[in-house]
Amino acid sequence: MRIALLETITTPGGHEVDFDRLLDEEWTKQGHEVSWFVPEDVNPVTKSQIVHLPGKSVSYAGKKGFAKWRTSFLREWRRRGWFNAAAKLARRQEVDAIVIPTSTYRYLRALRHSSLLQAGKPVIFILHGLNPGEAPKFFSELEKLPQQAMVETVVITFGDTVLGKTHSRMKAFSPPAYEPRDIAVRKAPLLRERVLRLGFFGQYRREKQLERFLDAFLSCKFSQPCELVVQGATMRLEDTEDFKRIQEKYKEHKQLSFIHKGLFGAEWQEAILQVDALLLPYGAPRYRYHWAGMLFTAIGHQRPVLASDEINPEVWEKYDLGMTFEATSEEALRNTLERFINTFAAKKEWYEAELARAAGEYSPSTFAERLVLLCEACNRKKSL
């Protein structure tokens, strides 16, 4: 099958970029022909064909107030233009299906005002979760689609419904694990007397309450030496200044080291595999509705996890990947962190077995194959 990834994101890295790469490489391995439909200034790192669509990408970076509203309008307008350009390519029989890998209900609204709706090829929109505020808008947009439209949506979630609701045009898929793609997965070495290395990785945001966690870590009584690597990739000026302040505040603590930059590709994968376990001690209601990229990075890289109980509880109900704690309790964080570290050597092999089980369920190849089957089913409906 000839599949086009229609992607409009502009970041050089992150989970969205890794997700696109996952689809590209898994489909290629399965024998499909992959192409990328992207704005004229976006150049994904890929061996597949790149087709540039007229119109530059639009970023919200640094935009506030009226400027942000204007940017939102421009992005919507450009999105319709990209959809129209993709429709022309589809009509010329250049692809068999189009997959939009990172979308929202707004993309469905733009679809209704574009010729992509009548392109005659399956168009699959992927949403990476829906919260209670977004879900009604999403289902409302689905209801507005004409019955003959070859449009399907995939919501990455757990279970078969979204907040107890489903729709004939919606499929619920479990997330795929983020496996290292430039270097091989390897087990962490045996502990014995060496220092246990822990990692706190990802984009820095204040909601992650990094200082709260660092204070808890420094107050713990561990039965073996530990060191903590803290990465902070910052996008906004205020986040950059805040992360620098934190670095300065904790610089005297030799068991802490900081990485203040984005990590991409092999460098990112190597950083994850250099630690024994990943720490996800932050909590927010949105993690109950959106899959956590760092948790599925841990599964793909086979690293045990300490996480707050707000991060994808459905996964923890099935797999013992480490330990969770009550997100709102500092005492629970400190006590659980101590237990996690002090029992780590004894439970390491058990965690590895559970991680392997989870990686089997959340296989990237299975996720990619399910999307192809959905495209094929959409095509069969057209021929009936």
Image (cartoon, rainbow, N blue to C red):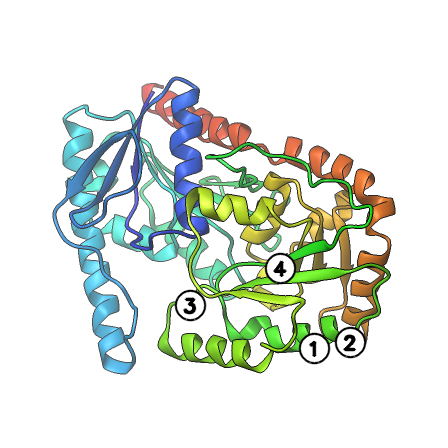
Cβ atoms under marks 1 and 2 closer than 8 Å: yes
Quote the CA–CA distance across marks 1 and 2: 6 Å
Residue 255, position in %: x, y?
67, 67
Residue type highlighted by circle 1: Asp
Mark closer to the observer (3, 4): 3
Disc on res. 288: 4
Of label 3 and label 4, which has the lower sequence position?
Answer: 3
Residue type highlighted by circle 3: Thr
Quote the CA–CA distance across marks 3 and 4: 24 Å
User: Quick one: 46 or 192, which is closer to the camera?
Assistant: 192
Left or right: residue 211 compared with residue 344: left
Mark closer to the observer (3, 2): 2
Q: Secondary structure at mark 1?
A: helix
Of label 3 and label 1, which has the lower sequence position?
Answer: 1
What is the quadrant of the N terminus in the image?
A: top left
Residue 27, position in %: x, y?
41, 26
**Residue identified by numbered label 1:** 215
Which residue is at 74% across, 54% downward? 195
Direction left: furthest residue: 54
Q: Secondary structure at mark 4?
A: helix
Which residue is at 38% across, 67% downward? 235
Q: Residues within 10 Å of mark 4 (few under 14, many from 20)?
A: many
